Image (tube, grey):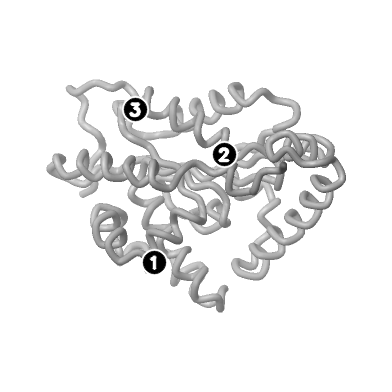
Amino acid sequence: MSKPLTSLVPSIEQRECTWTELQERLAHTHKTPILPSITISREFGCEGYPLALRLKELLEEASDWPWNVFDKALVDKVASDERLSREILSHLGNESHAQDVLRMHFGFLTHDEAYAKLVKHLVQIAMAGCAIIVGRGGAVVCQDLKNCFHFRLVGSFEFRVATLARRLELPQREAEELVRRQSRLREKFISEHLHADVTSTQWYDAVFNNGRQQMESIAQACLHIVESGWPDRAFFKQSPSHPVLAAP
């Protein structure tokens, strides 16, 4: 029996616990720290979630901070759950800054209220840091946030079909149709809501061919880009004598 697409996504409950850990860590800081975030875009069928999960492990080891993986399901839950919005977002990005970003770039680009609400929370979550945002146009939405790094996975049609067939235990023909259909829908969704071509390399710090590079190599390359590009080198030294860069 084939598996549903949701089987590829990490548990929401587990990721909520990670944010609780981050809240507790932030509660004990005297100033709100500026922390890096990452967005991962991928052609449908590429291994975005495996990359996100491996990056989470590497970043937690390198920075000694808890990181969390955000997808549409978790952001939707945060946006719709009053308790989560109050408890989790109380320690996330500055509300007025988030609104300024949205007004400047996306104020009139979407008429879908549900997606507009999700975009607002995406910006706040990315601003808070230690977030790995998978999909949902994150690279476009968070393009002007200085703490964000953006990566994209691409692959041949054959590779994406084979990967999806293996991960979802689908027959070849079903996997081919799913890749074709979802690829069209995904690009159409971003184009209509953000008026942007998500396939353009202009949005990304790096684009990786998922079919030609091993996942570990891609994850290590992403880690290196974040480490070398982050202005506060002490963040990745795990040294208590070097405080994390604090917001003024």
Q: Which residue is mark 2?
A: 49
Badge 1 crowding class, 10 Å Cα cut-off, few under 14, some 14 to 19, many 20 or more, is some
Q: CA distance from mark 2 to mark 1?
A: 23 Å
Q: Secondary structure at mark 3?
A: helix
Say which of 227 and 248 sits in front. 227
Q: Find disc 1 in the rendering and name its residue.
A: 80
Residue at (34% x, 25% y) in the render: 236
Q: Position of residue 197 (x, y in %)?
A: 69, 58
Q: Residue at x 68, y 36 (%)?
A: 167
State the residue lying farthest toward the front: 1
- In space, the residues marked 3 and 1 are separated at their CA atoms by 31 Å
SS state under label 1: helix
Q: Quadrant of residue 234?
A: top left
Residue 63's disc is: 3
Rendered position, 192 above or below 68? below
- Residue type pointed to by label 2: Tyr
- Amino acid type, callout 3: Ser
Of badges 2 and 3, the one in the foreground is 2
- Dot 2 alpha-carbon crowd within 10 angstroms: few under 14, some 14 to 19, many 20 or more: many
Above or below, comparing residue 142 to residue 238 in the picture: below
| Image coordinates for residue 59, horizontal then vertical, percent | 41, 29
Q: Which residue sits furthest right? A: 173
